[in-house]
Each structure stands twice: as structure tokens, then as C-alpha cells.
Image (cartoon, grey):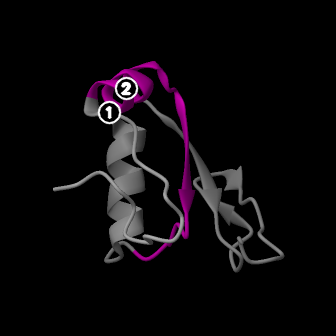
Amino acid sequence: MDSVSEDKGVGWKNPPAKEIDDLLKKSKVIAVVGLSSEVSRPSHGVASYLKKQGYTIIPVNPRKVQFWERSHILICAPFP
């Protein structure tokens, strides 16, 4: 699969796989955008797994205020 973004107008490319791997190994904090408190949602499963692996999770959700004893980062405007 090509590493070029699906949005061909942007021209952005993903970093090489080794760079991504190195970044994930060094990271200790991960923001999960759209984190849901519903256990059936994929975002909840991903965040739960990462938390069990020792990562600090920063929940980002425009509707929730707190999750896993952490305050959510509220997004008031859409990303460009």
C-alpha cells in the first residue's frame, strides 16, 4: 500500500514505518480523539489496550467531561 494520504490534494505522506515504530516506543502519552465510554466502541477498546500497556491516555471528546478519572480535552471547533 502506498504511504500517500488518501486525500491526494494534501500531498502529505506518512513517515517511514521505522520512524513510526520508534515514535511509538518512545511515547508515554497518547491522545485518543473521539474516546467513547461505551465498551462496545472501537475507541474504547484501543484506549483500554493502550492503558493496559502503560500509556497515559488523554481523552479527547466534545461531549464527555471525564473518563478514567481524567478530564477530557474538549474540542470547541472542528479541525481544519
Q: Position of residue 41 (x, y in %)?
A: 36, 76
Residue 24 is one of the magenta-drawn residues: yes
User: Going by the picture, which residue comes out furthest to the right?
Assistant: 76
Magenta stretch in the rendered image? 18-38
Residue on which disc 2 sits: 19
Mark 2 surroundings: few (<14), some (14-19) or many (≥20) residues within 10 A: few
* Label 1, label 2: how far apart the Cα atoms are: 5 Å
**Helix, strand, or loop for circle 2?**
helix
Q: Residue at x 42, y 49 (%)?
A: 13
Q: Residue furthest left?
A: 1
* 80, 29: nearer the viewer: 80
Q: Tell me: residue 58, above or below residue 65.
A: above
Residue 33: % across, % down:
56, 63
From the top left corner, tell me how far across and down residue 19 is, in percent.
37, 26
- Where is residue 9? Give x, y as percent: 51, 71
Q: Quadrant of residue 64?
A: bottom right
Residue identified by numbered label 1? 16
The C terminus lies in which quarter of the figure? bottom right
- Name the residue: 83% across, 75% down: 76
Quarter assignment of residue 40: bottom left
Q: Residue at x 55, y 70 (%)?
A: 34
Determine the residue positioned at 37% across, 69% down.
6
Asked whether disc 1 touches disc 2, contact meaning CB atoms under 8 Å apart, the reply is: yes
Q: Is residue 35 magenta?
A: yes
Q: Give whichever of 17, 12 is nearer the camera.
A: 12
